Amino acid sequence: MRERLQEIREEAIKQIQNSDALDKLNDARVAFLGKKGKLTAVLKGMKDVAAEERPMVGQMVNEARAGIEEKMEEKRTAIQKKLREEKMKKEV
């Protein structure tokens, strides 16, 4: 489970870093955090995890989600800044 979460997180970060527009970033958000996203699928599989392991697995999922969301916010800010700078150049 830990390896699977690490793979999902690395794949998400890679896709986020390769996003050069807000719509691509949103596609990454949906693919990993959306209703049918990869991380959401792991959460749905929690019923198959032994009861004593659920808190640990839940914490790992939450940490992965937080890491992905943090990277998305950083990238969103960078894209918006770039767009503002381009708009300012056009106006001058």
Image (cartoon, rainbow, N blue to C red):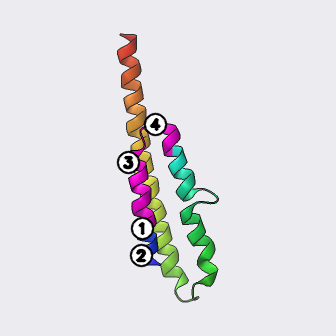
Secondary element under disc 2, as helix, strand or loop, is helix
Q: Quadrant of residue 33?
A: bottom right
Secondary element under disc 4, as helix, strand or loop, is loop
First reached walking from the N terminus: tag 1 or tag 4? 1
The type of residue carrying mark 1 is Glu
Secondary element under disc 3, as helix, strand or loop, is helix
In the image, the segment drawn in magenta is 8-25
Q: Are marks 2 and 1 in contact (CB under 8 Å)?
A: yes
Which residue has dot 3 on it?
Answer: 17
Q: Which mark is residue 21?
A: 4
Q: Indicate whether residue 21 is drawn in magenta.
A: yes
Residue drawn at point x = 46 percent, y = 37 percent:
21
- Measure the alpha-carbon separation of dots 3 and 2: 21 Å
Q: Are marks 3 and 1 in contact (CB under 8 Å)?
A: no
- Nearer to the camera, 14 or 83: 14
- Nearer to the camera, 60 or 44: 44
The type of residue carrying mark 2 is Glu
- Measure the alpha-carbon separation of dots 2 and 4: 30 Å
Secondary element under disc 1, as helix, strand or loop, is helix
Question: x, y (%) of residue 62?
Answer: 49, 67
